[in-house]
Each structure stands twice: as structure tokens, then as C-alpha cells.
Image (cartoon, rainbow, N blue to C red):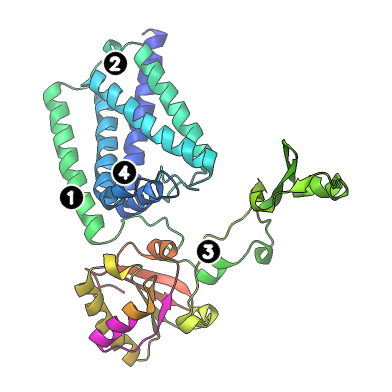
Amino acid sequence: MKFSSVAQNLIRFVLGGLFIFSGVIKMNDPLGFSYKLEEYFGADVLNLEFLQPLALPMAIFLVAFEVVLGLLMLLGHLRFLTFISMAGLMAFFTFLTFYSAYFNKVTDCGCFGDAIPLTPWQSFGKDVILSVLIGVYYALGLSNARPIVNFKAAAAVLGLSVIAMAGFTAQVMNHLPVWDFRAYKPGTDIARAMAPAEELGLTPPQFDAVYTLRKGDEVVEVTGTDYVEQKWWEKPEWVMDAEATQTIKVADGYVPPVHDFAIAPGGEDQTAQWLAYPESYWLVAYDFERADMEQLERLCREMQKMQDRGIPVVGLTSSGVEEIESLRARTQTNFPWSNGDGTALKTIVRSNPGVTYLRKGVVVSHSHFNDFPLTK
């Protein structure tokens, strides 16, 4: 067998396998991928807010398309269509990851979901390598990539795969992801996951300021360290533009996996108190407007029963006080609610609303609204 044929088959199986793996990982958590797309479409990133309502169907389509392309690459059928589609998809992802990395807009691309977190530059590098492999695969000649099964068998494999993907997607959308890679996964000690690097004896990320100094038409940028060492304050002809001051990361370090989270009913931080309870329930509804209101009201009543049994219950949401009080009045419930960061709340449980059960601050389980109170 020629070297070019061996190389092409190796590339073919690497590309096919990676596309399938990446697609299945994101298919396990389509809501998480849709949240990432919403970030990209936001006003401060790509300014494509009109696409945000379409983020979930786009996420489901993209991950299924990714798996289908991986299968077609492995099976060796529809080779030109597969090549064009892969190249187009990689161009799309490469643009997104470069934009994220260069402009520091989205700090985690979500390429492999929460299973394999990558920095924007790592994601961009991965996409460049895959794009090069796709180009080499094409250059070696599509006709040399022979099918491993006949067309009927390939069609059967694709058909069964599409049915399996539809069933799997329905399962995770109506319940919870099968594999939980998030910061709040069962078994997580929330207090330890929130602890800063210094408390754990680890090194945190290192940051430095960047000052913009002007002298007439001349402009220079100086780090805070250089500003001190080079005594720029002794050069009165250089004027600092305070509004242009930036903060940059100069060294990576440990970042707590759980951050931007607090339990603060009435504005008073009670996080430590709630994590110390022998057991507790969190009713998480990151946004009332986007929640299944019928299920939210039902869960409120279920949570009230738990509180009446002596188990502490707290609601967590990013919605406003008026909306919270309206919900409490409609459901005749009196357990406390804490207003928090919507992004952090989305991470806790992939259900709006959903329930999290803890013992002494350790996550025991999460429940989709379709499964509570059947699970605990």
C-alpha cells in the first residue's frame, strides 16, 4: 500500500473519530452548547442577537451534523460532499475560536463541552490543525479514500445513527445529561470548589495593568511592572490616559471551578450557612420568563412540603424581586429566594426549573422538573 494511501486513511479515521467524539459530547448537553452560542451571538461579541432565540435548534442541528460528517468520513461515501461540509464547518468554528481568542470575548469555546475545557487559543490551534488535515486529505485525492462498506450498508448505518441521535437528544432534553462534567456535578463539595487558590496552597493566575501614556501624537503602552521599574511618573511630559487602562493575564494559575455564586436571601450572604446544613434543597430557575411556569409553580409547592418537613429550601434565580414575590403569592410558599448570576445558575442544573439536593454542602443529585420528586 502506498504511503499516501496510508496517510490518507490515518487522517480519515482521525477526522472521523474526532468529529463523532466532539458531536456526541456536545449532544450529551445541547442546552450547554446553546448557551455558548448565545454568548457568541450577544451584543458584546458578534452582535447577532436576532439569532439568540435560534441557539437551541442550531445547537441540536450542528452536533447532529458533526456526527453525520464523522460517520460519512469513516464510511467513505459522499466523499466530496463530506469534504466540502467539513471544510465549511471548520471555517465557521475556526472563525469563532479566533475571534474569541484575539478579542478575549468568550473564554471557553465549548468545542468539547465541559468534558475537555480548552482556552480560546488552544481551541483555535486545534481548529487550525484539523483544517490542515482536511486540506491534506483532499490533496491526497478523494478517489483514493475507498468506502469500507457498500452504499446500502452505509445508508443503514446513517439511518440507525440518526434515529439513535434523535432518541438520545430527546432523553437529555427531557431529563438531564447522561454524563455530567460540570463544576456542580454530584459528589462536588461546593465550599472546596469555591475556595481560592491561596486557601488550597495553589498559585492563582497572575495579572498586570497596562497603562496608555501619551505625549503629543506619540502613544506607548506600559505594564504596571515596567511603569514602576522605569519610573514613568518622573516623566511629566507623558500623560496617562486613565480610561484606556487595561488588565491582562501574565500567567495562568488555579481558578476555583465554582465562582460568581452566592446564596444571599435579602442581600445578606448566607452561603456558608447553607452549605453547613445537614441537608438542603435548591430550587434553581435561572430566568422565570424562560422557565416552564407550570412546572415551576408545581416545584414551588413540592419545595414547600420539604421545608414543612424541616429540610431547608432556597430558591435561586436571576429574576427580579417583584417576579419572585408574585410567584410566592401565587403558590402560597414562604421559603427564601436568592437573586444571583444567571450564567452561574445555568451551570448548576440543565433544567429551568430544576432541583439540586445537598448533604453538608456536597451535591448529592440534580433533578429535571420531569423527574422530581421521583429522584433525590
User: Of helix, strand and loop, which one carries label 4?
Assistant: helix
Q: CA distance from mark 3 to mark 2?
A: 48 Å
Q: On the image, which quarter does residue 298 sit in?
A: bottom left
Judge depth for marks 4 and 3 and give the one in front.
3
Residue drawn where x is 18% and y is 47% of the image: 166
Closer to the chain start, of discs 4 and 3, is 4
> What residue does disc 4 label?
24
Q: Amino acid at mark 2?
A: Ala
Residue 34 position (above or below residue 217): below
- Of pointers 2 and 4, the one earlier in the residue sequence: 4
The reply to whether residue 10 is in sight is no
Q: Badge 3 is on which residue?
A: 259
Q: Given the image, on which type of amino acid does mark 1 rest?
A: Gly
Do the residues under discs 3 and 2 have CB atoms within 8 angstroms? Answer: no
Circle 3: residue type: His
Q: Is residue 147 magenta?
A: no
Q: Position of residue 307 (x, y in %)?
A: 34, 88
Mark 2: few/some/many CA within 10 Å (<14, 14-19, 20+)? many
- Marks 2/4 in contact by CB < 8 Å: the verdict is no
Find the magenta span and give its range.
324-339
**Which is more N-terminal, label 3 or label 1?**
1
Which residue lies under the disc numbered 2? 145
Residue linked to disc 1: 167
Q: Position of residue 131 (x, y in %)?
A: 41, 25
